[in-house]
Image (cartoon, helix red, strand yellow):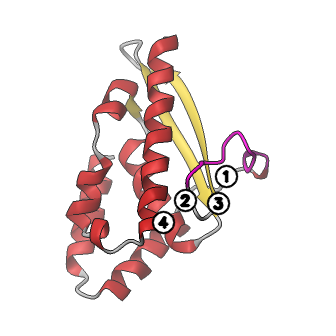
Amino acid sequence: MASKINEIIENFELLDEWDDRYRYLIELGRELEPLDEAAHNDDNKVRGCASQVWLETHVEDGPTGAPVLTFKGDSDAHIVRGLVYLVLTLYSGLPAADVIGTDAQALFQRLGLDSHLTPQRSNGVRSMVERIKSDARQAMATA
């Protein structure tokens, strides 16, 4: 996933205008793997997001026996779907310990999103990341 994150960073750096960056973010959101309609439920709903966001977590044993997490997600808002795509690209496929140790805020700062998102969207991203890290802690506790 690191190569995909690097590609996103490079593409962001090529875009000078924030309108273009937002359009790119919306494009990324369109690349999200579809979330089954049944997964749009209260258990998967991320609390603390102004838009509706759903996150489905799958845990499998990795090659070393440590839990590896993969995620699927969706939102009812275009820009937020792009943010979901960024977060899932950063975390999906990582061992639980790496999920806990990976700082999404650093990525958002590098992309300049930390200063260009509304406070509500920033809170929503924090809620998504905390939910992902909570799922990782739970996977480690039950491994």
Badge 1 crowding class, 10 Å Cα cut-off, few under 14, some 14 to 19, many 20 or more, is some
Question: Do the CB atoms of the residues marked 2 and 1 lie less than 8 Å apart?
Answer: yes
The three-letter code of the residue at mark 2 reads Leu
Q: Residue at x 52, y 12 (%)?
A: 142
Q: Which residue is mark 3?
A: 52
Which badge, 1 or 3, is on the more N-terminal residue?
Answer: 1
Q: Which residue is mark 4?
A: 120
Q: Nearer the viewer, residue 107 or 28?
A: 107
Q: Is residue 62 above or below residue 77?
A: above
The three-letter code of the residue at mark 3 reads Gln
Magenta stretch containing residue 46, yes or no? Answer: yes
Q: Which residue is mark 1?
A: 35
The three-letter code of the residue at mark 4 reads Gln
Question: Which quadrant of the figure has residue 53?
Answer: bottom right
Magenta stretch containing residue 69, yes or no? Answer: no
Find residue 32 and name its label: 2
Which badge, 1 or 4, is on the more N-terminal residue?
Answer: 1
Front tag of 3 and 2 = 3
x%, y% of residue 29?
A: 51, 66
Q: Residue at x 42, y 36 (%)?
A: 93
Which badge, 3 or 2, is on the more N-terminal residue?
Answer: 2
Q: Nearer the viewer, residue 110 or 47?
A: 47
The three-letter code of the residue at mark 1 reads Leu
Q: Determine the CA span between mark 2 and mark 4.
A: 22 Å
Question: Do the CB atoms of the residues marked 3 and 2 lie less than 8 Å apart?
Answer: no
Magenta segment, which residues?
38-48
Q: Determine the CA span between mark 1 and mark 4.
A: 23 Å
x%, y% of residue 6?
A: 24, 57
Front tag of 4 and 3 = 4
